[in-house]
Image (spheres, grey):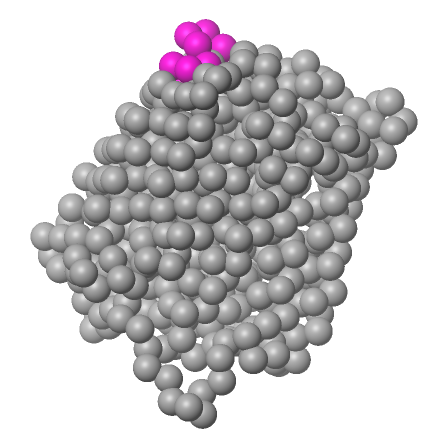
Amino acid sequence: MVFADMTTTSPVRRSSRTPRLHRLPDFRRLWIGDTVSQTGTAVTVLALPLVAIGPLGASPFEAGLLVMCEYLGFLLLGLPAGAWVDRMRRRRVMITGDLARAVLLASLPLAAWLGVLTLPQLYGVAFGLSVCTAFFDIAYQSHLPELVDDDRLVEANVALEASRTVTAAGAPGAGGALVAAVTAPVALAVDAVSFLASALLLSRIRRPDPRPARVPGARLRDEIAEGLRFVFRDRLLRALVLAATLSNACGTIGASMLLVLLAGDLGMSPFLCGLVFTAEALGGFLGSLLVTRVAARLGEGRAMIASVAVSGMLWLFAVPFFHADGRYAVACLLQGLGWTAFMTFKISAVSLRQRLTPAPLLGRANATFRFLSWGSMPLGALAGGLVGQYVSVRAALWTGAIGELFAVVALLPVVRGGVRGERTDG
């Protein structure tokens, strides 16, 4: 599903003079802006495929293509995006990405109102969103270390992830009710407004956002290659990116067909479809609160292994319970507990990259992770669409859930070689 850090995760002891994170004005603006944006995005996660499945009558394969387009930008532009972000003012990249996403989403309710909404437009908007998100997320993860001290990065990432899961907990259920009340295309306008609000808050950050110094004569190709070498020469980063790539690819095989199963095959209402996402978000929030305790109890390496293994088993157990009766509640519970377990892995690796990667390389290191781990997702969605179309939708869920368990193998070098807390080479 996604990845994160392996450095020491014991709580940082703050002095009485050290302000809490929410009292730092610039971090607070980033935090609130991201929370507002994530609330709208949680509505889109439900509304976008429901537009395809409902009003446009998409087949399982066509629904899989839509999910593929939602991540295709990371595959096509992920690597050069990192090099470009390392050359640009990062906050300006984030604001531009927010504004562009607002325009793209606003085009869908407009097209629906005019009666000209089509699947190709839906694919185009989904791809455009993925391109904007690729740039935004790389800049976002590279900008955070400029707003908080190194010893508070884990704390900041936990705070951001916790607020994301809290907003995501209520948004899908509320989004389902909104879709039922005003139709899915109109519900997408909520996300467009959220991106405008996020851009406004980001523009109010006062910390200087200088253009990074550029090495004279540096070529884009050489800068991209430097980021790739940095990640793959490091044992820990290499293990993380391979595990995340396999987990995301296989997870998307099943995720691309989940709403096809619920809304299409089982005929469940938008509100009920949204409950599984609410359960996942609640589970993720609980997991974000347990990260430091789990790592302290098991040790960083074993905690990462346990996180991926336990979450994979829980998601596998959930598959046979997806039915339009009481079993659906069990499926939602298992999905949520899976995310509780997975958060130790998810939160940890982001902090590792941010803390141990030199600032001039941070955008490219983030881009390498996103290119591989998120770039694998459109391929997983395409595979899910093919399995769903030519075998069965439920077979796609089984295939993805079983495949995710193999991500544990990629993490074995972490336990065998141990986890270090600071970089001593490169």
Q: Is residue 273 above or below residue 291?
A: above
In the rendered view, does 382 fall on the left or right side of 299? right
In the figure, 168 relative to 151: above or below? above
Quarter of the C terminus within the rendering: bottom left
> What residue is rendered at 79% in x and 32% in y?
182
Q: Quadrant of the N terminus?
A: top left
User: Looking at the image, which residue sits at the far left?
Assistant: 416
| Residue 425 covered by magenta stretch | no
User: Which quadrant of the view contains residue 295?
Assistant: bottom left
Question: Which residue is at the far top?
Answer: 390
Residue drawn at 51 percent across, 37 percent down = 277
| Extreme-right residue of the structure | 114
- Quadrant for residue 380, please give it: top left
Residue that appears at 60% across and 76% down: 26
Is 186 drawn above or below residue 166 in the view shown? above
Q: How many marks?
A: 0
The spot of residue 329 in percent (x, y) is 44, 28
Q: Is residue 224 visible?
A: no
- Which residue is drawn at the image coordinates 16% and 46% (left, top)? 412
Dominant secondary structure, magenta: helix
* Outermost residue to the front: 326
Work out whether 282 lies above or below 364: above
Q: Is residue 55 visible?
A: yes
Q: What's the magenta region?
A: 389-396
Residue 205 x %, y %: 65, 75
As for residue 390 lying within the magenta part, the answer is yes
Residue 177 picture location, percent across and down: 69, 34
- In this rendered view, identify the residue nearer to me: 384 or 24: 24
Image coordinates for residue 413, horizontal then vertical, percent: 15, 49
Quarter holding residue 24: bottom right
